[in-house]
């Protein structure tokens, strides 16, 4: 495809690496050919950098697709199942990253594939968990936004406000690991 066809959100590949366009800029100078300047993110390493192309230059489209899968269990690597074919497959910790602490058995996730290889796992933006253990909040500690540690039923430790008690259900942002609200 032509470099001028690149737009924000498009994915192309360069040297066998999938790149996501974060920002697109078309630059036309007098007495010269038009340039396409893009800010891209490497989907394998999350590195962000800029590339420039002639507007008539060609870039290679990437074979990237998303698929819904169900998380089953962890036996050193994380085992998922395709709900259509019931085929089970493993994904390494490096691909899942820090969001692995919020995986719950039976949870539906979105897996991004590049050349039929999983490159990222996306959980729902927010999930509801039950608080397994937290210290009691003390009266008078509410002058400012005071947070305390809470252990969720899946073993993850997050910061919650002092009014949250054991057994409460809380909504957590899975991208940042922050408390959103009581559920």
Image (tube, rainbow, N blue to C red):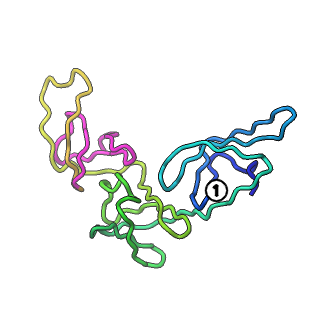
Q: Quadrant of residue 24?
A: top right
Q: Position of residue 116 (x, y in %)?
A: 53, 70
Which residue is at 76% across, 36% downward? 27
Which residue is at 77% across, 52% downward? 57
Which residue is at 38% across, 71% downward? 90
- The residue identified by callout 1 is 12
Classify the position of the C terminus by image quarter.
top left
Task: Sort mark 1 into few (<14), some (14-19) or many (20+) by Cα contacts within 10 Å.
Answer: many
Classify the position of the N terminus by image quarter.
bottom right
Location of residue 117 with respect to 23 vertically, above or below: below
In the image, 84: left or right of 151? Answer: right
Location of residue 79 with respect to 47 vertically, above or below: below
Residue extending farthest top: 143
Magenta extent: 155-183
In the image, 87: left or right of 41? Answer: left
- Please tell me how many numbered marks the rendered image carries: 1
Q: Position of residue 48 (x, y in %)?
A: 53, 44
Q: Position of residue 157 (x, y in %)?
A: 23, 46
Q: Position of residue 114 (x, y in %)?
A: 54, 64
């Amino acid at each position: 495809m032509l470099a001028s066809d690149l737009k924000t959100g498009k994915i192309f590949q360069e040297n066998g690496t999938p790149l996501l366009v974060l920002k697109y800029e078309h630059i036309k100078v007098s007495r010269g050919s038009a340039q396409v300047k893009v800010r891209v993110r490497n989907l394998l390493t999350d590195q962000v950098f800029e590339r420039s192309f002639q507007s008539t230059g060609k870039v290679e489209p990437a074979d990237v697709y998303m698929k819904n899968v169900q998380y089953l269990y962890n036996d050193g690597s994380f085992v998922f199942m395709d709900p259509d074919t019931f085929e089970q497959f493993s994904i390494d910790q490096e691909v899942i990253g820090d969001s692995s602490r919020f995986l719950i058995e039976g949870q539906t996730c979105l897996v991004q594939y590049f050349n039929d290889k999983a490159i990222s796992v996306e959980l729902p933006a927010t999930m509801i968990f039950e608080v397994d253990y937290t210290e009691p909040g003390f009266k008078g500690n509410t002058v400012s936004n005071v947070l305390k540690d809470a252990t969720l039923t899946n073993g993850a430790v997050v910061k919650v406000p002092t009014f949250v008690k054991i057994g409460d259900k809380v909504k957590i942002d899975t991208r940042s690991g922050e408390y959103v609200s009581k559920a």
